[in-house]
Amino acid sequence: MCKLTKDLILNLYSSTMRNGIFVFSIGLFLSACGGNEVEKSEFSDSFTVSLDTVMVDAGEEFLYLQDNLFLSELNAEDGYLINFNRQEVGAERINLDELKLDYLIPFEKEGPNGIPQYISGFLLTPEEHIFIWNYGFYKIFDQKGNLVRDLELDKLAPKVLGGSEVYPSRFYLDPENPNRLLGHFIKWEEKSYFLMDFDLEAGSYTEIELPFFEKTQVYNTDILHEGNWMGSYGTGIYPFSNSDKIILSTNVLNEVQIFDFKRDTLYTKAWDTPLLGSKRSYLPPKEVDGQTDEIEEIRKMAESDISYGSFIYDRASKKYYRFSHKSYFGEEKDEYGSYVPTRSDVYLSVFDADLELLAEALVPELSREPKRHFIKDGQIWMYLNVDDELGFVRLRVE
């Protein structure tokens, strides 16, 4: 049985088993994909793809898949994946070379080694420690769950990080300077984004404004309850780093803002292509009443238009990859009142090291946008839930 996901909801699709190969009649993949068998299909004049599926042996454990690997990180050499379990307040170290669970990493809820149940994110340091952050929480742990260092960024910058008005979205390590740390932050009230460049040795920081994202405000809809703001729907921001650059992309613009570590420069890169255009066409209303179903109609219209995805990077080939998609809907809704997509058109864009577009095409083998995905061994690994067990569909671009 193959399970696919929409946000944090698992949608079940039918499958059949033939000679040990999972054949999906509907869902993420339109072609067959199995453990050792590879299905090839030419989908453009520029390149072809091959697909296969692998499963992770978790032994007697049940891996935490409820968040679709949303809080997971690769190590520098791509040998393993750390998947955070917010229910158990722990993590799972998954060996991707051997496709098995190495061990569970325990964390504590309280005490000197305590961490919050709900964290904003984490990353793996060159020492293979785990840097975890949240509001007022910026600590580094080893892979046994022991505290290694408290960075105390909230004390270093109390006026900026002392409360809950500024959200710590993502952090990046300077590969050439262990005392330099950059953070990507969101100011909720102003709906603005900025970077903070920390010098941990000197105990100082510099703020770097990101005015690029002001142009995305036309895609946001404020949700009101009895005239009061209760949230918003619209632009998604996808931060990514390949060690010497920070790339900030959005789901509504075919454009990125780039911070170069080596040159300390900030610049933008934009594309306008026959398949994906330069931006999303649909502009939603500025605000809606949260007590009506109007926000679901807006969501349906927005997701029927183009959504540009996040970037991933292959260090070996020095190429960037990005999936984008458009979804199609009927009248069916899920238990939360959201329209359920019947399928999606999924596009793959390939860029060189300077983010020059090399190729772009519709991928008919994919009928749902990939959830968590990354590059390993020259292949794009895409998260797959197979009967509550962890699998990956691996896509090779040739």
Image (cartoon, grey):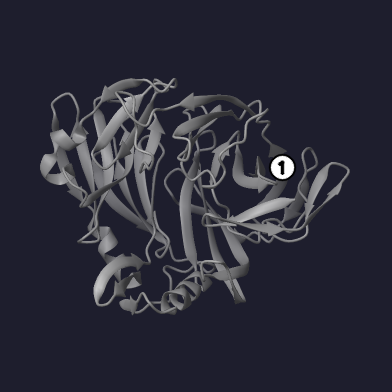
Q: Position of residue 377 (x, y in %)?
A: 60, 33
Q: Quadrant of residue 45?
A: bottom right
Q: Is residue 119 visible?
A: yes
- Taking 338 as reference, is 355 above or below it? above
Q: Amino acid at mark 1?
A: Thr
* Count of picture labels: 1
- Quickly name the residue at label 1: 53
At x 37%, y 67%, the residue is 233
Q: Position of residue 120 (x, y in %)?
A: 35, 43
In the picture, measured across the screen, residue 296 lies left or right of residue 2, that is left
Foreground residue among 110 and 184? 110
At x 78%, y 44%, the residue is 34
Q: Is residue 78 visible?
A: no
Q: Quadrant of residue 63?
A: top right
Foreground residue among 373 and 260? 373
Q: Quadrant of residue 237?
A: bottom left
In the picture, measured across the screen, residue 50 lies left or right of residue 78, that is right
At x 30%, y 74%, the residue is 225
Determine whether the residue tagged by mark 1 lies in a helix, strand or loop. Answer: strand
Q: Residue furthest left?
A: 159
Q: Position of residue 57 (x, y in %)?
A: 68, 31
- Taking 319 as reference, is 282 above or below it? below
Label 1 environment density (alpha carbons within 10 Å; few <14, some 14–19, many ≥20): many
Q: Residue furthest front?
A: 110
Foreground residue among 392 and 319? 392
Q: Position of residue 398 (x, y in %)?
A: 66, 45
At x 50%, y 74%, the residue is 300
